Image (cartoon, coloured by chain):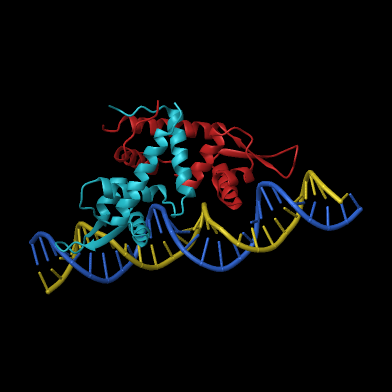
Chain colours: A red, B cyan, C blue, D yellow
Amino acid sequence: MAVQLRAGQALRLWHDVSLALVQGREPDLSTRQASVLIAIYLEPQPHTVRGLAARLGVTKPVITRALDTMGRQGLVSRKRDPADRRNVLVQRTVNGALFLERLGDLVAAKAAALPS
Amino acid sequence: MAVQLRAGQALRLWHDVSLALVQGREPDLSTRQASVLIAIYLEPQPHTVRGLAARLGVTKPVITRALDTMGRQGLVSRKRDPADRRNVLVQRTVNGALFLERLGDLVAAKAAALPS
DNA sequence: TCTAATCGGTTCGGGGCCGAAACGAAGTGA
DNA sequence: TCACTTCGTTTCGGCCCCGAACCGATTAGA
C-alpha cells in the first residue's frame, strides 16, 4: 500500500527532518552528499565512481569530493578493484550503516508525528 | 491518523527526493536554507532575523546569508519594520510559494511511489 | 608492442558557507 | 543628553564545493 502524504504534510516533514539535521551535532551533509551516500547503501554493490556519477547525473569530481569528505567522516571507504586496477570500489562502513539507520529512524519518527 | 513509514521506506524517500532536487535545474538549497525557507512559509508571520535564528538554533549570520542567497533567487524578500526600524521583516514571495508548492508535491509524489 | 580508450584524481579560478567578533543604525531609560 | 541595549549586517580567516580541463595509471585492441 502506498504511503499517503498530502503536500502540506510533506513540506512539514521535510522541514522537521532538515531542522533536526541542522540542530544535530554531526555536520549535516549537502543534498548531493546525501543522495550519494544513500545510493551506496540502498543500491546493490559494487559501486564505482563513474557509475555513481552517471546514476546521479553529476560530474566525477562531485563523487570524488563527496567520497573524500564522507570518507573522512568514516561513512564510506574506497578500495582499488583487484580485477581492474583502474576502478575504485566504494565500500560501506559500520559507521555509515549506523548513520543511515539513524536517518531512516528520524524521518520515520517525524512522519509518525505529523498532524493529520 | 499518523503517517506510517518504515525506516527503510523513509530512507528511500529521502534519497528519491534528494536525487530529484540534485538533478533539477534549480540550484539546490543547503539543509539550513531549506529549514529557514520552509519555516518562513509554515510558521505564522512576522519573521525577524533574530527570531528565525533562535527558532532554528543557529547564529544570526546564517540567517542573513540564507536570506541573501534566497533573496537573489527571488524566494524571499526583506523589508524594514516601520514600527521599529532596527527590525527586518522577512517576507514571502510568489516565487517562494511556488517553489515550496513544488517541493511539497515532489515529496508527496515520491512517498506515494514508494514500494510497500 | 604501442597507440588509444578508460579509470579515478587533481588543478584551476570562482564562489558560498562557517562562527566569532566588530560594526553602524535605531530605540530605551535616566 | 548620553550611556546602554538591541537590531541586522559585515569582516575575517578558514574550509568546502562547483565544472572544465588535464594528469598519471591501467587496460584493451590492432
Task: Give the left or right position of residue A104, taking residue D28 as reference.
Answer: left
Q: Tell me residue B109's x, y (percent).
A: 39, 38
Q: Residue at x 59, y 46 (%)?
A: A54
Q: Residue at x 18, y 64 (%)?
A: B85
Q: Is residue B36 visible?
A: no
The quarter of the rendered structure image containing the N terminus of chain A is: top left
Q: Tell me residue B58's x, y (percent).
A: 34, 49
Q: Residue at x 58, y 52 (%)?
A: A59
Residue in the foreground of this view, choosing between A22 and B11: B11
Location of residue C18 with respect to A48 vertically, above or below: below
Residue in the foreground of this view, choosing between B84 and A113: A113
Q: Residue at x 36, y 56 (%)?
A: B66
Which image quarter: residue B90?
A: bottom left
Task: Give the left or right position of residue D10, taking residue A73 as reference.
Answer: left
Q: Tell me residue B80's x, y (percent).
A: 21, 63
Q: Tell me residue A113's x, y (percent).
A: 30, 31
